Image (tube, rainbow, N blue to C red):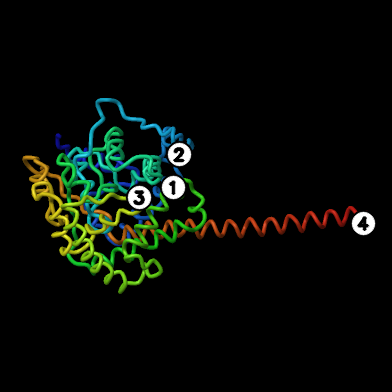
Amino acid sequence: MKYISVVSALSFAAQSSNARPSTLDEQSLSYFQGFIKGSYVGFESLLALAGFYENDDVKNNLNSNEESFQVHANEKESQTHIKIAGLGLGRTGSTSLVMALEILGYVVIHDDEQAEETDVYSAYEDELFDDDRFHEILGLRGYNATFKTAGHEWVAAHPEVKGILTVRDDPDKYVDSWLVAAPFIDIMEQRPFKWMRTVEELMPELSYEYRHTTTGGDVENYLDRDVLRQKYIEYNKEVRIRCVLSKTSRCSRPSFAKISFLFVCCVPNISLIQVQDTIPSERLLTFNVKQGWEPLCEFLGHPDPPQGIPFPHVHTRSKLEGEMFFLRMVTWVWKLFEVILFVSFLIAMRKAKAVITKDKEE
């Protein structure tokens, strides 16, 4: 794969996906600048959740019966297979890593693409095909790196795939960031989002990710800091046992919504042993985005880091807060619209009643 110039990198980052950052170093932005950028991301997310970015093939699959699912593969020259699996979720630098991979020439499926490829996610949730077929379809659609679908056991079973485990410095920083993102699921359950077809199709995965996985099943306390931190640590210990067992017995995922193993990658370094026990060291990179280009390029077999292109540091907390604010604002405006509509109806009825009464008097 060839590197691209600085200008091309910025252009590619802006155009590769609808809500992908256009600035490689968002940490240098002021809080206000980050908040405004996040608000625009919220607008792009609104369009995506409303199905604006789903093409006709995806919509046809969603509207058809289960037996008639069509792969709709790309042209032969752009078909590929999954080569890289990102094993980090949430606030672990995954978006920064996604942009770095795109600069290196990979085509990545991540959060933004989830709302574009809704049909394949929905079909997988309905158990129309297994993990291998799921990732084969992603490859046929042009993706060769995934951050939304593969757990470490799937990577371990496929020697052609390399895994990248993104980590944070400590669990408290993760919890701090997660609590900014967690209200997203509440917003999706409010009008008008809950009426959107894309949201409806993705809701099982979103609900499990935001409420169940982060609390070990204590879904009522998914916003409780103490519960999040405690379950976070307990969950890692549980997964460590499962990973040891997985050496001799491969577990299958009953549903895409239940990709609980994947959460191990969001959390502190206690989880590294668990994943490393499953994936050979030469195919697993434990990566903190603060490390920059060198370890990533060495792991992927790129001879030299891109010259003149800073490693992306994006999706700051201020930007996430801006995105959440915009999405909440949509629900507020919708409620206001409903009130205005109801008041207008009452006024119209009152006027109609007055006209009828006047006609009777005459």
Question: What whole-number distance in Å separates the C-alpha atoms at marks 3 and 2?
Answer: 18 Å
Disc 1 residue crowd, few under 14, some 14–19, many 20+, Cα 10 Å? some
Secondary structure type for disc 4: helix
Q: Earlier in the sequence, mark 2 or mark 1?
A: 2
Badge 1 element? helix
Residue 161 lies, with reference to residue 87, above or below; the image says above
C-alpha gap between disc 2 and disc 4: 57 Å
**Which of labels 4 and 1 is toward the front?**
1
Q: Position of residue 354 (x, y in %)?
A: 82, 57
Question: Which amino acid does the dot numbered 3 rest on?
Answer: Ser
**Residue under the point 39% across and 66% down:** 219
- Residue density around tag 2, few if under 14, some if 14–19, many if 20 or more, within 10 Å: some
Q: Which residue is mark 1?
A: 201
Classify 10 Å Cα crowding around label 3: few (below 14), some (14-19), many (20 and above).
some
* Label 2 with label 1: CB-CB less than 8 Å: yes
Q: Position of residue 59 (x, y in %)?
A: 45, 37
Q: Marks 3 and 4, Cα distance to the nearest angstrom?
A: 68 Å
Labels 3 and 1: the sequence-earlier one: 1
Closer to us: 114 or 237: 237
> What residue is pinned by disc 2?
62
Q: Which mark is residue 255?
A: 3
Give the amino acid at mark 4. Glu
Residue furthest bottom as drawn: 226
Q: Nearer the viewer, mark 3 or mark 2?
A: 3
Marks 3/1: CA distance? 14 Å
